[in-house]
Amino acid sequence: MKRFDLLLILAFALLLGGIGVNKYISNREEKQPEPKFDLLTVQVEKGWAYEIWINGKRYIFQDQIPAISETIPFATKMQAQMVGSKVLEKMRNHQNPSVKKEELIQWGILNSDGIPKSP
């Protein structure tokens, strides 16, 4: 009888241990909630800028056209919105949010010579 009791206690301990390990693994694998992204366009002194906020904190403030040597704001709200949307899309896809000159040409922000387009 004592042997049966010992086996029963051992089986119960193994069962509890298995449940604990399973609970630990499932807690570790739970997905973190997706961050909340917000895109805002703001008027600056000589044009437009965009801001990207993550979970209520400002992450990016882009007050000039990226990837060019001149310090020039976006000419229109629509340009700032477009580039901000593309950057936000990259961030949501866990990609590097940097912007290349070629992308700005492709998106119509710069002309084929790399010069900002006027409104």
Image (tube, rainbow, N blue to C red):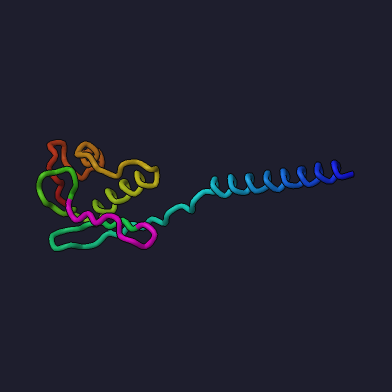
Q: Is residue 117 left or right of residue 6?
A: left
Q: Is residue 19 left or right of residue 5?
A: left
Q: Is residue 94 left or right of residue 48?
A: right
Query: Residue at left 71%, top 48%?
Result: 16
Taking depth in this image into account, of 89 and 112 the one nearest to the observer is 89
Query: Residue at left 39%, top 47%?
Result: 92
Q: In the rendered picture of this protein, how many numbered marks are placed on residues?
A: 0
Taking depth in this image into account, of 84 and 6 the one nearest to the observer is 6
| Magenta-colored stretch includes residue 20 | no
In the rendered image, the vertical position of residue 24 relative to residue 105, given as above or below: below
Q: On the rendered image, what quadrant is the N terminus found in?
A: top right
| Magenta-colored stretch includes residue 58 | yes
Magenta segment, prevailing SS (helix, strand or loop) = strand
Percent across and percent down for residue 65 are 18, 49
- Residue at the right extreme of this rendering: 1
Q: Is residue 72 left or right of residue 102?
A: left
In the rendered image, the vertical position of residue 100 relative to residue 35, given as above or below: above
Percent across and percent down for residue 88 are 34, 49
Q: Which residues are magenta?
A: 54-64
Give residue 115's quadrant in the image. Answer: top left
Query: Residue at left 30%, top 60%?
Result: 58
Taking depth in this image into account, of 5 and 77 the one nearest to the observer is 5
Taking depth in this image into account, of 118 and 102 the one nearest to the observer is 102
Query: Residue at left 85%, top 41%?
Result: 3
